[in-house]
Image (tube, helix red, strand yellow):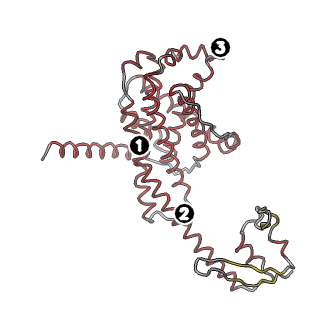
Amino acid sequence: MAGGERSMISLLNESRMMMKQILETHAPDGLEMDMKPLLDLVEDILSRANSSATALVIGVPAAKVENTEENMHRASLFSMLHTLSITIDRISRELELKSLSSGDAHATTLTICRMLASFGWDAKLVLTLAAFAFNYGEFWLLTQVYSTNQLAKSMAILKQLPAIMEQSGPLKPRFHAMNSLIDAMLDISRCIVQLKELPPKYISADVPALSDAMAHVPTAVYWTIRSASACASQITALSSMGHEYIISTTDAWELSTLAHKLRNISEHLQKQVALCQQHIGEKKHMELYQNLGSLFEMTHIDNMKILRALVYAKDDILPLVDGSTKRRVCSIPVLISNELCTSITLPVLVSDIFRLTLMC
């Protein structure tokens, strides 16, 4: 066997062994949590921090990040943070501790997975990103305000931020790679949360697209947590070693390699999520068709139920539009006692015009 083949087999075996260890830590307690509000908060922090990194280090204007204050005040988010803040803090400390001790990346990831053994895969991922976002956001918040706020300036000196910013030239490749990696981490997190949100009423685990996606989730979570650990190591090392670290290390390659791996995983998951959503759409259309068929077979005192099903099933949005102004003007009930000529365009029939007489 050639040396290259032996090396490839060795890498595959090592990868299988690592994933076996990760799967052995997974012992969910069955408690389901909606991680979307927390992911929204994490994404807000990381997006703003990345914008600061771009402006302060790479030297281009900060991108505008939409104001998400309304989402940040959801009752469900505060309730979740009240329950999980200690867990997030423990992970944050673990990331920082292993960064200072130059711990093995796989060992750090394994430790975090053990700490989160009772959580689902989506929760493991979002909680780890929340812990990372806390440290990463704090770092970049200080870089923004230390020149104008005395308290921030004193804290920044402790973290050697002025020296780091003065020697920012060598940082450009590293922070560019870190920004790309964080974007990839967020992409994967969105995919996994989207998979969790898929309605079981319309899609089951035996659907090939969902089955394939779920089979890749543990690997995606592992490499995303490992990437968060790698980014945390960069930030911690910068704060603790300052200029010495800038000169003595070249870790942009590691970050870029992780980003490439995550992008490949993310692209596959996104394709599977799209297939799942297509499957759900087809199921919903079939359900609507069957419901309409049942409605047309029933006897009605008027046509309100049929119209609601055809035009808009909910009452909270005005479904009728003034053709001249394109504005929504009224709801279905105003049509009672009026005669209505309705044109329905279907994929097969270009237009099928029929007359509906609305009766009180």
Task: Looking at the image, tell me whether mark 3 or mark 1 is earlier in sequence order.
Answer: 3
The local secondary structure at tag 2 comes to loop
Q: Which residue is mark 3?
A: 150
The local secondary structure at tag 3 comes to helix
- Residue 194: percent from left, percent from top: 54, 53
Q: Residue furthest left?
A: 1
Q: CA distance from mark 3 to mark 2?
A: 54 Å
Give amino acid for label 2: Pro
Q: Residue furthest front?
A: 324
- Residue 250: percent from left, percent from top: 36, 25
Give amino acid for label 1: Tyr
Placement of 73 over or under 151, stated as above or below:
below
Task: Count the labels in the image.
Answer: 3
Q: CA distance from mark 1 to mark 2?
A: 25 Å
Camera-near label (3 vs 2) is 3
Give amino acid for label 3: Gln
Q: Which residue is mark 2?
A: 200
Q: Residue at x 66, y 41 (%)?
A: 79
Q: Quick one: 135 or 173, which is closer to the camera?
A: 173
Camera-near label (3 vs 1) is 3
Placement of 190 over or under 299, stated as above or below:
above
Q: Residue at x 43, y 29 (%)?
A: 174
Residue 222 image label: 1
The 10 Å Cα crowd at callout 1, few under 14, some 14 to 19, many 20 or more, is many
Q: Would you identify the image quadrant in which residue 318 lies?
A: bottom right
